[in-house]
Image (cartoon, rainbow, N blue to C red):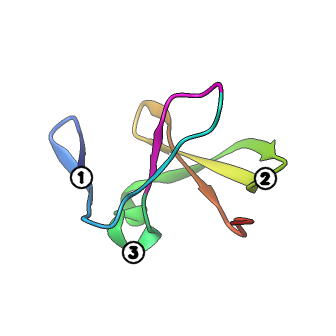
Amino acid sequence: MRIVIDGTLLADTTRAIELRERGYPPRQYLLRDDVRMDLLTGSDTVTHCPFKGDAAYFSFGEHEGVAWSYARPRW
């Protein structure tokens, strides 16, 4: 899986994990080691999932909320 925004490669991985939760479309989760975290900016947005914990959100330039991360996932 490759993630490209405005011609910039943000992630390139063969280790994505697909998570399927009832009521939500399938989501691909990537390891931080496979994401160019140096190109992302943290935002003030935080959400909570009772199964996965708190998620912090990231932006790339003018593109807000392009990624989120669970610092301590509960899986």
Nearer the camera: disc 2 or disc 3? 2
Looking at this view, is 44 or 51 the one in front?
51
Residue bounds of the magenta highlight: 23-29
Nearer the camera: disc 2 or disc 1? 2
| Secondary element at image label 2 | loop
Q: What residue type is labelled 3?
A: Asp
Q: Earlier in the sequence, mark 2 or mark 1?
A: 1
Looking at this view, is 24 or 7 the one in front?
24
Within 10 Å of disc 1 (Cα), the crowding (few <14, some 14-19, many 20+) is: few
Distance from disc 1 to disc 3, alpha carbons, whole Å, reads 14 Å
Residue 13 in the magenta stretch? The answer is: no
Q: In this view, does 47 lie to the left or right of 21?
A: right
Q: What numbered label is drawn on residue 68? A: none
Within 10 Å of disc 2 (Cα), the crowding (few <14, some 14-19, many 20+) is: few
* Image x and y of residue 42, in percent: 59, 52
Residue topped by disc 1: 1
Residue topped by disc 2: 51
Q: What residue type is labelled 2?
A: Phe
Q: Residue furthest front?
A: 22
Tell me which residue sits at (20%, 47%) in the image.
8
Q: Which residue lies furthest to the left in this view?
A: 7
Tell me which residue sits at (59%, 28%) in the image.
24
Looking at this view, is 25 or 9 the one in front?
25
The quadrant holding residue 46 is: top right
Q: What numbered label is drawn on residue 33? A: 3
Distance from disc 2 to disc 1, alpha carbons, whole Å, reads 25 Å
Within 10 Å of disc 3 (Cα), the crowding (few <14, some 14-19, many 20+) is: few
Tell me which residue sits at (65%, 32%) in the image.
22
Q: Which amino acid does label 1 sit on?
A: Met
Quadrant into which the C terminus falls = bottom right
Distance from disc 2 to disc 3, alpha carbons, whole Å, reads 23 Å
Say above or below: 72 vs 8: below
